[in-house]
Structure formats: C-alpha cells, structure tokens
Amino acid sequence: MISTKKYLPLAAVVALLILANCTTEEIAATNPAPTATSTSIPAATATAEPTAPAERTATTGPTLTTAPATPTQMPGSPVPQEPDASAATGEDSDPRRGGVFNTLWSDPPTLDPHVVTDGTSLEIVIEIFSGLVHLGPDTSNPFEPDLAESWSISGGSTVYVFKLRNDLKFSNGDPVTAQDFKWSFERAAHPDTASTIAGEILGDIVGIQDIIEGNATTASGIEVIDERTLRITIDAPKAYFIAKLTYPTAFVLNRKNVESAGDSWTDDPVGTGPFVLKEYRVGQRIRIARNDNYWGRAAYLDEVVFNLAGGVAMAMYENDEIDVTGVGFNDLDRVQDPTQEISNDLVDVPADFGISYIGFNLAEAPFDDANFRRALNHAVDKQLIAEQVFLNQVKPASGIIPPGFPGYSPEISGLEFDLELAQDLLAQSAYADPETRPRIVITEPGTGGTPSLTTRIVAEMWLRNLGVEIEIQQVDWATYLDDLYRGRLQVWGGLSWQADYPDPQSFLDVLFRSDSSINHGGYSNIQVDEYLIAAQIEQDRVRRIGLYNDAEQLIVSDAAWLPLWWGVGSKALVKPWVEGYKFSSLSVGKYKDVWINR
C-alpha cells in the first residue's frame, strides 16, 4: 500500500495546478456553455473545457461537446408539419427574411452525413441534409416528420411504411423519390463508404449487415413501393428504430451528385435541408445559404457564417464579430451585473444530455485489469474538482446516463472517491509495481498546446494518490477520431458523448455492447450483453428501463470508463438583434427559424 503521508492533500494539488498551470483564459474556457471554439462532443462542436469535443454516434452514439460531444416513445400520429406556402403567403416580403448570422466554430472532419461521428460536423450537416424524420425541440415527443409526411407500423412492429411529401426536391431542383432513400441507405452501408457507424444506425434493417460485410449490394428490407412510398423491414420489434432515423447516417443523398464528383462531392453537396453550402475555406470560414428548394417554409436568414479562424470568443462577441457565445467563469459576474448593458444579452442554456469521460482500452495493459481501472476511478476526487476548479459548473458523474434523460437512475452506485480503497485495489492488481507497470499515454484532441485542465488534474491525482505516472499527448481532431475508431488509443480524454436521440440505447447499447462498432474500449461482459439485447426488443417500457439500469450498474462497477462530468445549465450571450435562436439539450437544426431584427 502506498502511504498517503508522501503526498500533498488533494485540495493543495488542485490549488497548485490552478495557480501554476492555468491562465485566466483557460479557467474562463472551462465553462461548458456552447461556444464555438474547437475542442468537444471538438465534442463535436467547439466547446470549452470541461465540455470536451463531443463525440457523436448516435450521438455521439457516440454524440465523441465543445462546439457551439430517452424512454423511447413509438410515434403514434406524426405531428403535421407546415406546408410550403411561400407562394401563397408572400414569403419574399416577410420582414423577417434576410440578414446574416455569425458564429465561431471549428473545421468539421467531414460533411458526408453517412460517416459523421462528431458534433462539430453534425451541427453543420443537419442544416444542409435531412431524412425521413427529425428531432424536434419537445423532448417528451421528439420525433417529427421531415421528408416523410407520415408513416405506419405493422408486422408486429417490424414493418415501417413511409409516405414522402409531394414534390420534394433536392437543392439543385432534382426530384426526391423513395429510390433515393434506398440507394442512400445502401450507400451508407457499403464498405467503400467506410462508415464506422452504419451498422449501429441502420443495422436493424434486414439485409444491411450483409452489405456492410461485403456480401451484398442491396438490402431486401428496403423496398420501393412507388416514387413516394418506402417500406422498411427490421429484424425484430425495436422501440428506438424511428429515433435512429433522425441521425445523419439515415439522410438522403443525391446519387448523381455523389457519383459524378467522386471523393470531392462534399465540396459542392446537393442536399434537402433548409440551407446549402455556399463556401468552405478550410481554417477560415464556412458559409451556408438559404435553400430555395426546401420543402417547407424557407429559412429567414440569407446566410450563416461559421468563423473557423479561431479567436477569443468573448472579445469577438463584444466587437460584434459573432452573434452568440458561452460565458466563461471570469466573465460571469460582469455579465450578470444588471448595471452592465451586456447583461441584457444573457440567456439560460439547458444542460445537454452528455457525459465527459476518460476512456480505457481494455485490450491493452494495464487496463486489462479491472482492479487497476477501479483504483484509478476511486483515486479521483471529482466533487473537489467540480467545486474548487469549475465552481459547480459541472456535475460529477456517478454513472453513464445523465439526469433528466430517459433511463437515468439515481440508484446507480458509482465508484466514488475513496483513497484507501483505491490503494488497496492497486495493490491487488497485476500492475501494483511501478517498475514493471506498462507506460501509460493518454491522448486528447489538441494542437500541441497546454493539455486540458481536467486531464492534468486527473493525471496529478493518479500520480499523487497512487504513484501512477501518465504521459499526455495531443493530436488534431480528425486524427483523434480516426485513431479512436480504429482502436489505436490506450487511454483517451478531452471527450464527451452526447446522445443522438432520446433513448438509453444511445448511451449503453452503442457504447458498451461487445460487438458494437462504437465500443472503442473493447469492453465485454456477457451479462451486460444479455441485458442490452433483451432491452432491444422489450416492449414494456418499465421492464426495458430496468434492463438498462441493470446493465449500467455492471458497466460502472467494471470501471469500463472513468465517468467525469454531466452537463449543468449554463449561461450564454445572444445579440439583441437575433430572434428565434434556441438552445436545446439535443442536437437539432436551429438556424431555419433564426432571423435578424435590425
């Protein structure tokens, strides 16, 4: 056992790190509000620590959030959507029409909907492309018709028949038909597309897995009845299937656009969303403009400009260079002061449904030892960090599913800070001897600057409490994602996972089922798999949630991850001339309804 007398108190560790290693800007950046600076779910958008790049899946799955990283409900009668009434209402003369919205962002790893796994890419993709259904702002009834005007479910909840809207068009004017959806789903699954998540999003459809494995090119479970009717058959009744179709892997693409332009088709993509890509200059800006062939009411804005060049968000906001920003710790008192004019711009941001964590590759030593992983969990005082470093702008995560999300259970027993237990578990592990312990390298997204504050504090606690030394390395966001999905990372941080749809399957099944392509750490537990597979087809909501709770407890007890933070409500600033900009706990399209009032 390692004597605690050799180590500084944890409070002193935190204080030293803050004083010696943190700049004012970095502490300000720890606010998890959605600011567009690159980090999270790149978490995938740009947000600041501790909201790391949000990984996405469905997802970010795997939703792997710094940009700006559910009980499933079967849709009864789809909510009717507004018709395209532009001609009848004189849309061009609408006083809300026109203007440009500016925001700070980071370069997306991809604009191909079928391969998106991160939030930075997803937030742009969902404005340019669309699918049969989409997520709406109402988390209690989130599934809304999009290109499909309605759908029916039969065959013991295994057959879905979608009826497309009349006169649908791609942004270039080409008609959208049921055949386009069949081709798009099969293209997403084809090995040449190299989608790491097609199996998780579309794999329930009969025949899709054969395409993924290279044994077929068409799926029998996708049938074109006529130009406006698509029938999809899945392998078993699954309550979350409609939810999966809201993810970009299920979006429709224009076959002629994709095949004629080859690998560069995303330079000038043809989509069905409310916007089109107007310009993309890597490292400088992305501009999206109104899609005049959109099926519904056209976007009010002429353009949205994503600034990719970086900068200090608060300074850019106060200089009117961007129209929205999160609020960092150092600025919070000032912007909340009612005597300051800027306080009029302050808005509340709901907590996102995500979790920041440190992941372990269980196929690599020393993380193949459960006692070693548990020791690392018990050695981190998350409550101390949350209170003294992040001023309670994060909530220590005791489990995987965040509060307020379908399937969350306060009864999950986490691996809480317990120094004596941590040292006992380390002594019981196969890697107690530091002389023979394998080298440990934690990787996080970055450009070679100072590692994230959370990662440094966790590494320091591991060192001082257990004598476990950690090296920290940074790689660019695209490389990070590629290495993560290929299983090349030993330990990874600077990441969060945000749910892609409101169902516990989006956390537990896609991230921890043994054969999931998004199970980056290679976690495997036969009992967990049994619970997760049973939950896939369980139609009773209470029993289904119970299965997920049982699986989650085992996952946490096995220390598959070091769960760090759940999101909390935060603050942001929105310019007074911006109307209709709404924050959501889920990743939903937001710019169509924004307008500039000045």
Image (tube, rainbow, N blue to C red):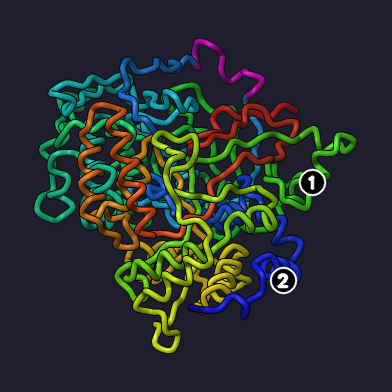
Q: Nearer the viewer, residue 421 or 485?
A: 421
User: Is 316 situated left or right of 589 in this image?
Assistant: right
Residue 56 in the image, given as x and y percentages of width and height:
42, 49
Instruction: Say if the magenta span includes residue 485.
Output: no
Residue 88 falls inside the magenta stretch: yes
Question: Which structural element holds mark 2?
Answer: helix
Give residue 304's position: percent from left, percent from top: 59, 40
Residue 330 shows in the view: yes
On screen, residue 423 above or below 575: below
Q: Position of residue 310 (x, y in %)?
A: 65, 58
Q: Kindly report the distance in space between the C-alpha atoms of the residues bearing marks 2 and 1.
A: 32 Å
Q: Is residue 430 left or right of residue 540?
A: right
Dominant secondary structure, magenta: helix
| Front residue of 500 and 2 | 2
The relative height of residue 9 versus residue 386 in the rendered view (above or below) is: below
For mark 1, what is the residue?
318
Q: Residue furthest bottom?
A: 435
- The one nearer the camera, 123 or 243, is 243
Looking at the rendered structure, the kind of residue marked 1 is: Glu
| Residue at (57, 52) in percent of width and height | 51
Q: How many marks overall?
A: 2
Q: Amino acid at mark 2?
A: Leu
Q: Report the residue marked by disc 2.
A: 16
Percent from the top left, x then y, of residue 7?
63, 77
Of label 2 and label 1, which has the lower sequence position? 2
Quadrant position of residue 102: top right
Task: Look at the image and give the residue range highlighted in magenta.
Answer: 86-96
- Compared to residue 520, the image places residue 271 above or below, namely above
Is residue 47 shown left or right of residue 251? right
Quarter of the picture holding the C terminus: top right
Q: Residue at x 31, y 43 (%)?
A: 550
